[in-house]
Every structure is written in structure tokens, then in C-alpha cells.
């Protein structure tokens, strides 16, 4: 894989990005200066996307107890997969266009350089655990759909409905409001009742609250246009209707490093909300949403998976770290690389005086010497880390300042 990428995109954006990066790079690298030997990290460490603060703490605890790093990351992300209030992963994940939750996950193990993954897995809330079984108990790297489900069930996993009431409501709200040209009545088309309505389904004991925290990447909500379908990239049209969640890709990535310098990484997700059933993102694709090399380190991503699949982001970041880049430099350069290769006009918009991507993407990287970092297309991103100082969220480098 080539290491000599020269970004060629919009110069103004690049200059703005460089200024922002210089400031944020300082913030991240303060945590562990470039070239710091692994021993300076003070023991095992783990990094994750921001929704993984609890995960990195758990992963480090397990590493201290002597667990394999693959078990540490899988048990770390399990906390988020089990959490019904995180609508990006596992139980409670936002569903596909049919209202069915479909999960993707992968695990990579540095010491054996093996991977395991599952894609479009339904009804099993812990796809990362199933991915680890694929790694450990088969000669394969990736199982999908019905085969992945049968594999999970034969290992004792029990099926359950992963669609929480919050996720169902968000899906139904999207379904009803996506077009005026169908038989579902948009908010703006429905008659106003003359009194209170009994907003309960038969099995509900109390009205569902729509207060679940948002953990996904990117601009979460699209105003529902009063006169039709959402306008991609343009300024949102105002309407009285509650906006619906649009094109969100939330995910958790977690990577861990043992005291001896062994690495493992895991990425798990419910993928793009309202996706076409069967759509597979970057998370289970080794080299795209997750990769590790025991001689170098690990990398992974959250955000628009399609952009990672066509650029093989995680493998490229690890490769670049192997060539001497810091984790943050490699992640930042990957952001530029993705944009440099983004030729589709619909994925760009004009915001005043600048041309910007319509989505977000975040990269996380951990080097074998204990140096770690991340970068995001948009400002405001944070990542999780746990080392001798404990688990915490830290700011990430970025290319574009949100306005
Ligand atoms: N990065 C998660 C996805 O695109 O599915």
C-alpha cells in the first residue's frame, strides 16, 4: 500500500484544517508525547470511540486480570451492545428500512493475525462475541445473515427482539415523514385531534419517553420538509414537524494493548439507520473499519462506512503508523485521503465560502509503543482512552470547524 499520498483537495479547506489540527494535535499529544516508549504508558491501555468510555475502563481491568486483548475489547464493547439507550450498537440500535435491527462486527487479534466478523446479523445483541467465535472456532473470516445467525445459535446465543421502543418510534417517524407521495400520513398531513389522544400501544404500561441519548456520528436530524422528501445537502427547510434522524452511522470501535505489547481491536455497529436491508458497512470489513498488526498497532473508525470501504482506511492507517507517522498524523492524513478520493458531488455541499462533506467520519489509532490518537472530519469529536490515569474522554483532531 502506497505511503506517499499527497492531498490535492480544496486549498482553503486545507489551510483551515491545518490550523485547527495544529491546535487539536497539541491537545491530544500532550497525553503521550510522540515517540514515548510503551513503558511510559504505565501498563495496559485501551482506546475507543466516545461511546466507549465504560468500554475502555472494562478492557483495561480485564487486561490487568490477564485476559487476552481480544477478550478485553469484546467484553468492553459488550457494555455498549447491551445498553438499550445507545442507539448505534447492539440492543436498541436503529433499524434498517424495514424496521429490523441488523448488526455488523469484527474482531482482530494481533498475536495470531487472525480476524473474525459477522454481518447483517439479526436478533443477537452481541455480534462482537459472535465475531470472536468466528475468529477462534472457524477457518473463516466473515459470516453473514442467516448463516451468521445459525452459527451464533449453535454456540448457545439466544435470539431476542433488538428493536427498542425508542428505535421503533424513530423508525416509524422516518417512515411516515419521508414522502408525501405514499400512504403514510406525514405529521403535516394528519388532522389535529379535538382532544387528548391515547398514545399507547396495547402492551405499553406508560407512554414511551423519547429521551434516549444520541451517541451517533454526524448531523443527526433532518428537518422534515413541509412539502416533501428531505433535501440532501441543502439548507434544511423549516416545518412544524419534529425532525427525523437522517443517515446516521453510529458505531463503537475499541482497541487494546497489553503490558507485553500485544494488540487487539474490535468494531461493532447497527450500521446506517434506515439502510437497505442487507447493507453491510465497514465495521465487519477487515482493513476498512478495523485492523491491527501486532508489530505496529491498531486502527478503526466510526462514521460513513462506505467512505472507509473504498479507501481501506484502517489498514492504511496502521500501514502509515508502521512507516513512522504518529497515530494522530495517520488518522488526520486518512481524513484527507478520504476527501481527496471523494468524487461524488452529492457528498459535498457549499456552506457559505467553503465546500464541505455532508457526513462525518472518525478514525482512532493505537500504536504498539503506547502512543494513541484520533482525527475526525468535523470539529467537536472526542474519543475515549484508559491508561494508568484512568478512563476519560479527550478531544480529537479535525479538518472542518462546525459553524
Ligand atoms: N461505520 C459504520 C457503518 O457505516 O456501518
Image (spheres, rainbow, N blue to C red):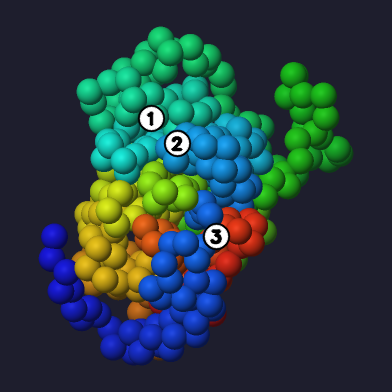
Q: Which label was assigned to residue 68? A: 2
Element class at badge 3: loop
Instruction: State the residue position of label 1.
Output: 131
Q: Nearer the viewer, mark 1 or mark 2?
A: 2
Is tag 3's residue or tag 2's residue first in the polypeptide sequence? 3
Q: Nearer the viewer, mark 3 or mark 2?
A: 3
- Up/down of 18 relative to 106, above or below: below
Instruction: State the residue position of label 3.
Output: 42
Q: Count numbered badges in the picture.
A: 3
Is tag 1's residue or tag 3's residue first in the polypeptide sequence? 3
Indicate the quadrant where residue 190 lies.
top right
Indicate the quadrant where residue 34 lies.
bottom left
The C terminus appears in which quarter of the rendering?
Answer: bottom right
Residue at horizontal 38%, vertical 47%? 262
Residue 292 position, x and y percent, is: 31, 49
Which residue is nearer to you in this view: 329 or 193?
329
Residue at horizontal 32%, vertical 29%? 135
Q: CA distance from mark 1 to mark 2?
A: 15 Å
Element class at badge 2: loop
Residue 248 position, x and y percent, is: 48, 51
Which residue is nearer to you in this view: 118 or 188?
118
Which residue is nearer to you in this view: 283 or 330?
330
Which residue is nearer to you in this view: 96 or 282?
282
Amino acid at each position: 500500500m502506497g505511503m506517499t499520498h499527497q492531498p490535492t483537495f480544496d486549498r482553503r479547506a486545507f489551510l483551515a484544517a491545518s490550523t485547527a489540527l495544529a491546535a487539536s494535535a497539541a491537545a491530544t499529544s500532550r497525553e503521550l508525547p510522540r515517540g514515548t516508549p510503551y513503558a511510559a504508558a504505565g501498563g495496559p491501555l485501551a482506546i475507543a470511540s466516545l461511546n466507549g468510555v465504560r468500554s475502555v475502563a472494562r478492557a483495561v481491568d480485564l487486561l490487568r486480570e490477564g485476559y487476552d486483548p481480544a477478550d478485553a475489547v469484546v467484553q468492553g464493547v459488550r457494555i455498549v451492545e447491551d445498553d438499550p439507550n445507545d442507539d448505534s450498537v447492539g440492543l436498541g440500535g436503529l433499524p434498517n428500512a424495514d424496521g429490523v435491527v441488523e448488526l455488523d462486527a469484527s474482531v482482530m487479534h494481533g498475536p495470531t493475525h487472525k480476524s473474525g466478523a459477522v454481518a447483517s446479523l439479526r436478533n443477537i445483541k452481541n455480534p462482537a462475541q459472535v465475531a470472536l467465535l468466528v475468529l477462534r472456532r472457524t477457518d473463516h473470516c466473515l459470516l453473514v445473515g442467516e448463516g451468521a445467525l445459525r452459527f451464533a445459535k449453535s454456540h448457545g446465543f439466544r435470539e431476542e427482539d433488538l428493536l427498542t421502543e425508542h428505535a421503533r418510534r424513530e423508525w416509524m417517524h422516518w417512515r411516515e415523514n419521508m414522502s408525501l407521495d405514499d400512504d403514510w400520513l406525514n405529521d403535516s398531513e394528519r388532522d389535529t385531534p379535538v382532544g387528548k389522544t391515547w398514545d399507547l400501544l396495547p402492551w405499553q404500561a406508560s407512554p414511551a419517553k423519547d429521551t434516549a441519548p444520541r451517541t451517533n456520528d454526524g448531523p443527526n436530524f433532518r428537518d422534515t420538509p413541509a412539502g416533501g422528501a428531505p433535501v440532501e445537502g441543502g439548507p434544511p427547510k423549516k416545518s412544524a414537524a419534529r425532525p427525523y434522524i437522517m443517515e446516521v452511522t453510529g458505531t463503537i470501535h475499541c482497541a487494546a494493548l497489553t503490558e507485553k505489547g500485544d494488540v487487539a481491536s474490535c468494531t461493532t455497529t447497527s450500521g446506517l439507520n434506515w439502510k437497505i436491508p442487507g447493507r453491510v458497512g465497514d465495521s465487519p470489513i477487515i482493513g476498512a473499519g478495523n485492523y491491527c498488526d501486532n508489530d505496529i498497532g491498531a486502527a478503526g473508525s466510526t462514521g460513513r462506512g462506505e467512505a472507509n470501504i473504498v479507501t481501506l482506511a484502517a489498514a492504511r492507517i496502521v500501514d502509515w503508523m508502521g512507516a513512522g507517522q504518529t497515530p494522530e498524523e495517520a488518522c488526520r492524513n486518512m481524513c484527507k485521503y478520504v476527501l481527496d478520493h471523494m468524487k461524488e458531488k452529492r457528498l459535498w455541499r457549499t456552506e457559505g465560502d467553503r465546500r464541505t462533506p455532508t457526513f462525518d467520519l472518525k478514525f482512532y489509532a493505537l500504536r504498539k509503543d503506547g502512543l494513541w490518537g484520533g482525527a475526525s472530519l468535523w470539529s467537536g469529536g472526542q474519543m475515549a482512552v484508559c491508561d494508568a490515569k484512568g478512563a476519560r474522554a479527550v478531544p480529537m483532531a479535525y479538518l472542518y470547524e462546525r459553524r
